[in-house]
Amino acid sequence: MNRAPVIVHPPCAGGRRVTLHGQDLGRARRPGEVAAILRRAGFCAAGPPWDDAGLVEWRDGGPDIWSMP
């Protein structure tokens, strides 16, 4: 099974951890920060990367979920 290269991990204190190919890139507190983190890492996408499920896997909630349950 192929896994998306970008993983946005479940919400926790301080935001959601973002990884690219398993490398920790930092934490984001909103979708725009995910895009900024990915740009800094050299990952470019034509549009918002979360629109493509083959590129981004959102764990425990999509781009609208930012707080812990």
Image (cartoon, grey):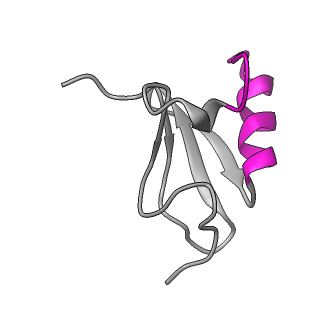
With respect to residue 12, does 6 lie above or below? above
Q: Quadrant of residue 2?
A: top left
Q: Residue at x 59, y 35 (%)?
A: 51
Q: Residue at x 63, y 63 (%)?
A: 64
Q: Residue at x 40, y 28 (%)?
A: 4
Give x and y (percent) for residue 43.
68, 18
Q: How many marks?
A: 0
Residues drawn in magenta? 31-48
Image quadrant containing the N terminus: top left
Give x and y (percent) for residue 25.
64, 37
With respect to residue 38, does 9 lie above or below? below
Towards the viewer: 4 or 40: 4
Q: Residue furthest left?
A: 1
Towards the viewer: 25 or 64: 64
Q: Quadrant of residue 18?
A: top right
Give x and y (percent) for residue 31.
73, 50
Looking at the image, residue 15 sits to the left or right of residue 1; the answer is right
Give x and y (percent) for residue 21.
46, 25
Can residue 36 be found in the magenta stretch?
yes
With respect to residue 21, does 30 lie above or below? below
Can residue 3 be found in the magenta stretch?
no
With respect to residue 15, does 41 lie above or below? above
